[in-house]
Amino acid sequence: MISKKICLVGDFGVGKTSLIRRFVDAQFSDQYLSTVGVKISRKVVEITPNNQPEKLKLQMLIWDLEGSNKFKAIAPAYLQGARGTIVVADVTRIDTIDRVSGHIYNFLEINPQGFLVVALNKSDLVDEEKLSKLLEMVQSQAQDRVIGIYPTSAKTGIHVDLIFETLACAIIEKE
């Protein structure tokens, strides 16, 4: 079994921890619990890479990084060695969308060969028209290393498994 480090990055309160809980434990809670430092979860996924007859198992070591400004100075140390990241923004807070490109840049500066997925979280709280505009806005910021931009909702579960599986597939296919 292959084991790879994945980081979730983004501003405070965007739903990083909730996305991880939905993916790993199939749970959601409305209670806000601020992550202090880093919390590591793990989940094994089975992936069928392109042109492969058999499934491969990937153990994802999922690092949930604190989103506060004071943590940003030491965050690069936690990003080292990550094969991929999910940059999370909150669609109800435009300032978190504006900072997506900064999170992308910070990750790629440390892991230039890493893969990125962008999760526009809390998509259940905005209408389709606004969501479409936000997707366009993020696509214009995205770099070629971004392999997908998805509207997600930890509450409803929409696209949560997809963001992690997209990242897992990219990592497996590169190995």
Image (cartoon, rainbow, N blue to C red):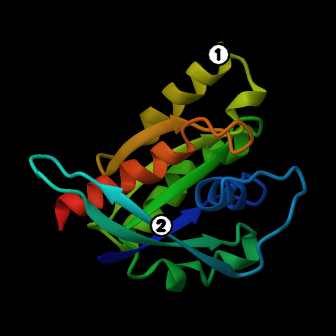
Q: Which residue ends up furthest to the front in the rendered image?
A: 54
Residue at screen point 75% across, 69% down: 68
For the residue marked with disc 2, what is the amino acid?
A: Asn
Element carrying mark 2: helix
On the image, numbered disc 1 is attached to which residue?
128
Q: In the rendered image, which quarter contains the C terminus? A: bottom left
1 horizontally vs 73: left or right = left
Which badge, 2 or 1, comes first in the chain's sequence? 2
Residue at screen point 56% across, 20% down: 132
Q: Which of the 4 image quarters holds residue 32?
A: bottom right
Vertical relation: 36 (above or below) 69 = below
Residue at screen point 85% across, 65% down: 33
Residue at screen point 63% across, 72% down: 65
124 horizontally vs 57: left or right = right
Q: Of 3 and 12, which appears nearest the observer?
A: 3
Q: Which of the 4 image quarters holds residue 115?
A: bottom left
Badge number at residue 42: none
Can you give x and y, in whole percent of width and height, for residue 155 in the image?
75, 41
Badge number at residue 106: 2
